[in-house]
Image (cartoon, helix red, strand yellow):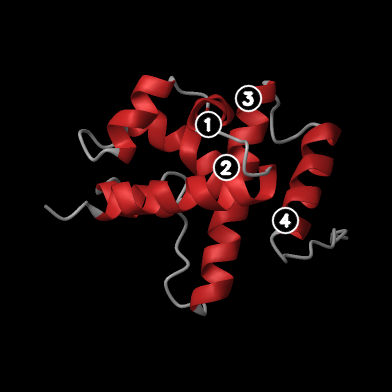
Amino acid sequence: MTKSEVSVWINKKFLEWQLIQGESANQYEFADYLGVSEATLSLWINDIKPPGKHSADLIAAKFGPEIYDLIGLPRPYMISTINLPHEIRDNLTDAIYKVNLELSSRGLSGDSPEADEITTKIFEEHGVKYTRIIKK
């Protein structure tokens, strides 16, 4: 039996993460990194059950929103970027998603100075340069 795209993708992300962490890094540590139990990760890796919405949010926070596409869920915080070049669209969408996730996890409103700093930093990490425009 062939493994699903979801299982293959999660296995690939585990191996990429393991290369960065060192060969001694294991699935238990990877599950902890994602914020799920080892049993839950095992279900995904062994193609028994795909991630649900909450788990997809956790995975997307670490690896970007592609997981939503694989499990057939709409990407949250989508904006109309349909006419942008593919790479720019993906980088911008990932940046917006990560900003929203970070701000909500810290309980910040978008109007706070800290939110502005966090947003600018995350955008820069995704290749999006933000310059404040002062309106007269």
Q: Residue drawn 54% across and 48% down?
A: 63
Task: Give the amino acid type for the residue marked by disc 3 in the picture.
Answer: Ser
Lower position in the chain sequence, tag 1 or tag 4 = 1
Q: Which mark is residue 62?
A: 2
User: The residue tagged with tag 3: helix, strand or loop?
Assistant: helix
Q: Are marks 2 and 1 in contact (CB under 8 Å)?
A: yes
**Location of mark 1 (residue):** 34
| Residue 124, horizontal then vertical, whole percent | 78, 59
Dividing the picture into quadrants, the one containing residue 133 is: bottom right
Q: Which callout, 3 or 4, points at the residue further toward the start of the chain?
A: 3
Give the Cα separation between the discs numbered 1 and 3: 15 Å
Residue depicted at x 38% and y 30% = 41
Q: Amino acid at mark 2?
A: Lys
Q: Nearer the viewer, mark 4 or mark 2?
A: 2
Q: Residues within 10 Å of mark 1 (few under 14, many from 20)?
A: many
Residue extending farthest to the left is 1
